[in-house]
Image (cartoon, rainbow, N blue to C red):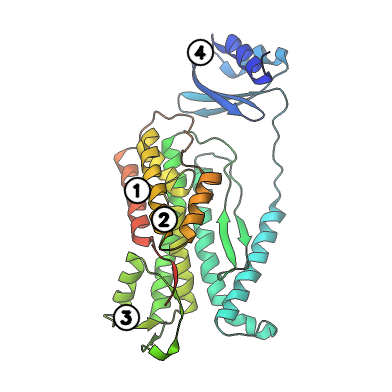
Amino acid sequence: MPTPLEIILKNVLGEIEGLFTVERYYVKPPGIAFVAKPKYAAIDYKAEAIKRLTPFGYYVRFTEAGDLVLLEVATKPFKERRKKYWVNVALFGVTVVSTVAVGTMNAGGNLFNPLEWAIGVPFAAALLGILLCHEFGHYIASRIHRIAATLPYFIPFPNIVGTMGAFIKMESAVPDRRALLDVGAAGPIAGFVVAVPLTVVGIHLSPVLPPAPEAGEMFGFGTSILFDLLVRLVKGPLPSDAIIQLHPLAFAGWIGLWVTALNLLPVGQLDGGHVIYAMFGRNSIWVARIAFFALIPLGFLWFGWFLWAALILLWVRLRHPPPINDGIKLNAARMAVGWTVLVIFVLTFIPIPFSII
């Protein structure tokens, strides 16, 4: 006995074959999405498709992408999401409190004395500034390409930085690989541009401590190619056993650059996954597989990479879904942007982010 989706597929294909050339279709709850090319420019294909499909009780929605159309067909109305900005505001407010609290504790302040919370503001302001620029880079690029997207959702969390970062959600299909590249690259580039000068200022304000063998074990932060270069630029040559006590701005910059690298892992629908799919299309799966399997040996250096590998398998996945119009390739300028983003990933990646020294 045919399933409801099989019935929709048979009915729809029979009714639209005179209007469209269907290139592919896939399940998209609550119905089926068809990527198709209109056959006749002179025909109002939207009105004609609705006229043919509504007698079956179907609801129809269109998204245009160049010469292709995403035609969504379902047996119940498409839900229009109500904007709940209070959720975004509330999460951001809680994240402000959690990051200021962490900044206060890291600076040696007393959380039970409200007057001392002010010393946690520089760390929180710098970190949230980097994250805001990152997420609004995605949001503005989405709006430019008329992709429906939410405002940033911040995630407060009781860890060493007070947050698990932030994200936006694209609520409509990506029209083509150009839009995918722009949206994927805009966030990391915006956050990177803000994080680098904040890190430079923070390193300048960070004291260099003399080696103290008698101090015992200490919690240490790893370094990336870029962070090491910035330290050398600002502090000059240092002894190999020198210890830098990170200023709150430097710590916020370090976290911002590390988050940039995590987002640029070239897998699934992470920012890096968006970028490599835009650049290489379906061949990007090979890059994603190499990146994923590279996390396994790295997990023996820092256990967190095992957790990231599990997260990728269970949630992010390796394969990136194609945009509506997958045939439009990037021009030289956008390819250059893509390569620039991949260079940023290499420069900011930290093999061992945390360790006991």
- Work out whether mark 2 precedes mark 3 in sequence or the reverse, and give the earlier one: 2
Q: How far apart are marks 1 and 3 (CA)?
A: 31 Å
Indicate which disc residue 235 carries: 3
Please state which amino acid type lies under the numbered disc 3. Lys
- Work out whether mark 1 precedes mark 4 in sequence or the reverse, and give the earlier one: 4
Indicate which disc residue 6 carries: none
Mark 2 or 3: the one toward you? 3
Please state which amino acid type lies under the numbered disc 2. Ile
Check disc 3: other Cα within 10 Å, few if <14, some if 14-19, many if 20+: some
Image spot of residue 195 (x, y percent)? 43, 66
Mark 1 or 4: the one toward you? 1
Image spot of residue 304 (x, y percent)? 49, 60
Closest to the observer: 211 or 325? 211
* Residue beneath the point at 69% across and 19% down: 58
Which residue position is annotated with label 4? 42
85 with respect to 223 (left or right):
right
Indicate which disc residue 189 carries: 2
* Residue beneath the point at 39% across and 77% down: 203
Say if residue 120 shows up in the picture.
Answer: no
62 with respect to 263 (left or right):
right
Above or below: residue 282 compared with residue 233:
above
- Work out whether mark 1 precedes mark 3 in sequence or the reverse, and give the earlier one: 3
Q: Tell me the element at label 4.
A: loop
Mark 3 or 4: the one toward you? 3
Residues at discs 1 and 2 in contact (Cβ within 8 Å): yes
Q: Distance between the residues labelled 4 and 2?
A: 42 Å
Residues at discs 1 and 4 in contact (Cβ within 8 Å): no
- Work out whether mark 4 precedes mark 2 in sequence or the reverse, and give the earlier one: 4
